[in-house]
Image (cartoon, helix red, strand yellow):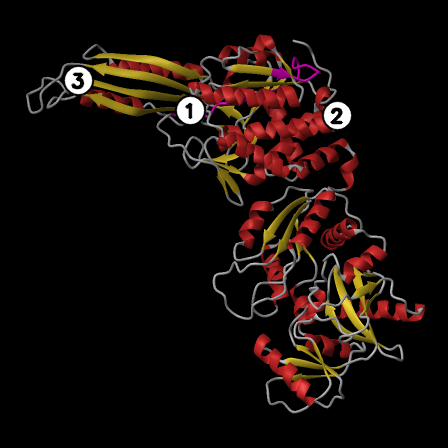
Amino acid sequence: MKIALVYSRSTNVINLFGTPNKEKIGLKTIKRIADSLKAGKHQVEVIEAGKDVVEQLEHFMPRVVKGERPGLVFNVSYGIQGQARYTHVPSILEMVGIPYIGSGPLAHSLALDKVVAKMIFRQQGLPTPDFAVLDAPGFELPDLKFPLIVKPKNEAVSFGLRVVKNERELREGADVIFQKYEQPVLVEQFIQGREVNVGILGNDPPEALPPAELLFGKGGPKIYTYEDKTRRSGREIEIECPARLPAKLAEQAVDLAKKAFKALGCYDCCRVDMRIDRQNRLYILEVNSLPSLGEHGSYTAAAQAAGLDYAALVNRLVDVAAARYFGTPAPPQIGAAETEPEGRVFSYLIERRDKLEKRVEEWTRMHRRTGDPTGLREAVLRAREIFQDELKLKPIPDLSDDRCAWAFETAAGASGGTLLVGNLDVPYERTVPHHMFRRDPESFYGEGVGLTAGPLAMTEFALRALRAVRQLNKVPLGLMLYSDEGQDCRYSAELLRAAMSRARQVLVLRPGNPEAHIINQRRGWRSYELVVEGSAGRVGSVQKRADVLQWSMERLQRAFALTSRSKRIAVAARDIHSESYPRHLPHKFSCTLLLNYGDVSKAEEVEAAIRKIFGKKEYRWELKLISDRHPMKKRQRNERISRAYLKLAEELEMPLQVESSLYPSAAGLAPAGPAVMCGIGPVAHHAFTPEESLSRISLMQRTLLLARFLQTQANIPVKQK
């Protein structure tokens, strides 16, 4: 599970305003908690609470897939400033919808307000020392007998705590609190005797840790001061746990602690401080709703006495909070199906979500545009390291040329099985500005992040998950990577066709379309180079015919008119350019002419019509075919594989739809035999532009979906082709 350990030490706020917090948690304690959580196999991020805490939590805790628990915040933040500071982080977490360990804002607020807490204790019939509240200097003496205790009304950690024996000491102690803490003073009858506390752990029902007694020894007041807690008093306060109490008195202390915990509405943990008078009567002093997890604290000592070492205590707190939020008394890491291969695959991926996202970043930061031999060679070496060296896939020599295509297979072989097809290059043209990797809570951004980085990372971790449950080599599976997508598969096409012809089904690792679509049909795409040349006329001279630019544009307009939605034909032009001499009209015109089509015969008809439009050699012109990306045809076999994918997505409660696409892919190279599905990669937006992005939640969803689909292919008999 993702656990964000949230604490506060600095003043990362907009303005310093209100009562500052003087209570700090030690960095040594933070490290001990974090190490304990990691030992419990949790993914841990340490976050310092401040004005940007929500943004940090969003980065660490993205939206979850079905069956994946939301992350938890391990809250040890005492706040930065202002009133009811314990409530600040829990209130923010309540607002943004993140589960957390410990009490809610209301319980923290009640526990911090010692007067209100004591009134609730009295209302519930729980014993607490008599008390009074002093609002300002010059107060009348309360109707209480000395010795008394003075303390701030709304503080913790024994701030301002003092035993006073007469009126002078009372007024001095109260004045210090009025000036230093700027709040009313709680005056309480001092109970001569012993001090014990009882830690509570759990909720329904809460469990009590063994009572702990504070042994003050000789010298100094018999109270636990702030200086004692921070080890600055010069005296050693010992903690004895279990406290040496008569069995009946220990039972009473435990019972009172549980009742105080419930009276204030606490969750998960607290420490209830009490005094025992000379007649063995118990009095509740206060409830610490955020008990210290410091090395020398009585709460951790009591846990140790109960058989919980530090790591066990920390992870038990996670368990009780998870039980409260998710409804399981002993929640497993990923659900009841964990012992089955499907559940173990789920566990593997969820536990490595950070590594999956890190791999997307790694691929995105790797410069590997089409035509960049250095960057692509680095990409090939990294792909071989991952798929061949680490995942132990075997190379397929006759389907690889070490120039633009590389093929691998599992021990079960690729023939007659599933073939995954993906590109290593980022198919950007040189004119597109380079953009670096960045992220926000919902998306990743960067060059090729959706077109290649997401699909490559998804494929790797889906295969890693299968290998972890010993199923990878049982899946008849091939992986075909190529590096000339930006050149319309001009050099890899023959090998891609050969690999696809051996497969039973082909999954093309293009990104999913917006609205969470996969693709079962794609249009074809032809690119032509159109060049028109003529004589160089002078500006202002009488011309017998239109100049080259005007003549070409008039005919292009007629070619554009061939576009027909019903015939699934579109004609367009780009990269329009003309050449001319100084003070002359253009003598040369060129452009890239684009033909988007659904059927090859229709494309042939349109090409013939375009050539007819340009007609006789009034000007010298040439229409040269540069590339032809074949359409991915809609076949019954494609429907079958799409339905299987959709059914799995429905079981996993993932959004998924099927649609056709205007743009071509390597799926168009597939022969008639295998079933083909495209767009199985994570959902991308604004592909081929500087705003390209990848949906963060879809990365996890599509990785899990691919892994589960490949699991269904394990041990399926194959027909050798």
Q: Is residue 303 above or below residue 618?
A: below
Is there a contact, CB below 8 Å, between mark 3 and mark 1? no
Rate crowding at label 3 as few (under 14), some (14 to 19) or many (20 or more) other CA atoms within 10 Å: some
CB atoms at circles 1 and 2 under 8 Å apart?
Answer: no
Which residue bears the numbered disc 1? 568
In which quadrant of the rendered image does the C terminus lie?
top right
- Residue at image position (85%, 78%) is 277
**Lower position in the chain sequence, tag 3 or tag 2:** 2
The reply, left or right, for residue 77 in relation to residue 120 is left
Helix, strand or loop for disc 2: loop
Residue 436: which quarter of the image?
A: top left
Q: Which mark is residue 587?
A: 3
Q: Is residue 656 visible?
A: no
Mark 3 and 2 residues: CB-CB less than 8 Å, in contact?
Answer: no
> Residue at coordinates 61% horizontally, 54% vertically from top-left?
97
- The residue carrying mark 2 is 470
Q: Position of residue 116 (x, y in %)?
A: 69, 76
Furthest-left residue in this view? 541
In this view, the residue in front, 459 or 268, is 268
Query: Which amino acid type is shown beneath numbered disc 2?
Result: Arg
- Amino acid identity at mark 3: His
Q: Secondary structure at mark 1?
A: loop
Residue range corresponding to the magenta coloring: 408-429
Q: Does residue 390 lie above or below 118 as drawn?
A: above
| Picture residue at 9% right of the left edge, 21% below the top | 538
